[in-house]
Amino acid sequence: RLAPHVMQASSIHLLQFAGRYRSRFCHPCARPLPGAEAESGQTSSPCHDAEGPPVAPPESGWRAVYRRSKESMASTICVDTGRGYAKYGMADGAPAKIQICEPRAEASQQTLYTHVFRRLGLKRPQLAQMALIVAEPFRLAAHEHARELEAWRFETQKRILQAYKLHRLCIVDSASLCLFANKRTSGVVVNIGFALTFVVPVVRGHIVRRAVRTVRIGGAALTQFYSSILDRLGVEPSANSSLPHITAARNLKEVSCEAWPTTLEEHLGHSPFALSQLLTRDDAPVFSTTV
């Protein structure tokens, strides 16, 4: 199994993937943890594909890694920042989110971590015993953003460690984390952001940065589409609601929008943005929701 260990916060080289474990692989952020081989009784060996033949580890080494992994989850915080929202939570708990876009932003990029720690009920003395995993933004995945990525990593590490004195810090690219969560190390990750959509191929834990593609359409366009539908149908927020019309459209999108297994153009026989045709159809699934 994958066995990540967060390194000491003084280093920005953040992950160790221990040798001789099933589905192990090389990762560009991985560096050997001093003394790790002696501790686990393993010797380092070349990485191979996660789908390659498994190498059975000694029982004592597997148990040691599993115990450390389970114990570390209870003291590990995860934060994933986007342009509109940030998701956060403990590694062994359910995620929550903070709105960082206007209107009605709950935090800014500068105050985000203070809000996260406060909502998790963590006091400053407790942070010295905590590890933090931060997801790199998808917008920095492409090869042409390499310098900006390095600067972002450095500034993020410096700001967090100096302000909060965390025990450990781990920064990992978002695409790899998406695959790890689905027990994969290779795949294509499609992230639909606020204004942009990113297509990120990952092979054996490495982003193929020269193959990353950015499409200039995102969730904001879909919100505008929902707003157009509401306008066309003459639907307005209730009189006692203080929600702006665009916010109501966004909320409706977030609770009702889902991915269709085939392209909508193939399913409908015409572009889904052809509202005059779309609104005359009577074969669409209908359900009620409250926003």
Image: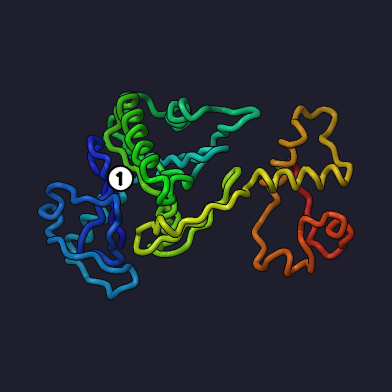
Residue 178, position as x, y percentages in the image: 45, 55
Q: Nearer the viewer, residue 135 or 41?
A: 135
Taking the spot 76% from the left edge, 46% from the top edge, the residue there is: 226
Q: Which residue is mark 1?
A: 72
Residue 14: % across, % down: 28, 45
Pick whichever, 275 or 114, lies toward us. Answer: 275
Quadrant in the picture for the C terminus:
top right
Residue 115 horizontal/vertical position (percent): 47, 27
In the displayed image of the protein, which residue is found farthest to the front?
Answer: 144
Residue 64 visible to an observer of this rendering:
yes
Residue 187, located in which quarter of the rendered image?
bottom left
Q: In x, y percent, where is residue 64? A: 21, 55
Residue type for callout 1: Ser
Asked if residue 127 can be seen in this view, the reply is: no
Residue 160 position (above or below residue 266) = above
Badge 1 density bin: few <14, some 14–19, many ≥20, Cα 10 Å: some
Q: Nearer the viewer, residue 63 or 115?
A: 115
Q: Residue at x 70, y 41 (%)?
A: 250
Q: Secondary structure at mark 1?
A: helix
Q: Quadrant of residue 120?
A: top left
Outermost residue on the bottom side: it is 53
In the displayed structure, 29 sits above or below 57; it is above
Drawn side of residue 22 relative to residue 268, left or right: left
Side of 81 where 290 appears, left or right: right
Where is the N terminus found, in terms of image quarters? bottom left
For the point 47% across and 62% down, the residue is 188
Q: Is residue 147 left or right of residue 229?
A: left
Query: Which residue is more in the foreground, 87 or 190?
Result: 190
280 vs 123, left or right, is right
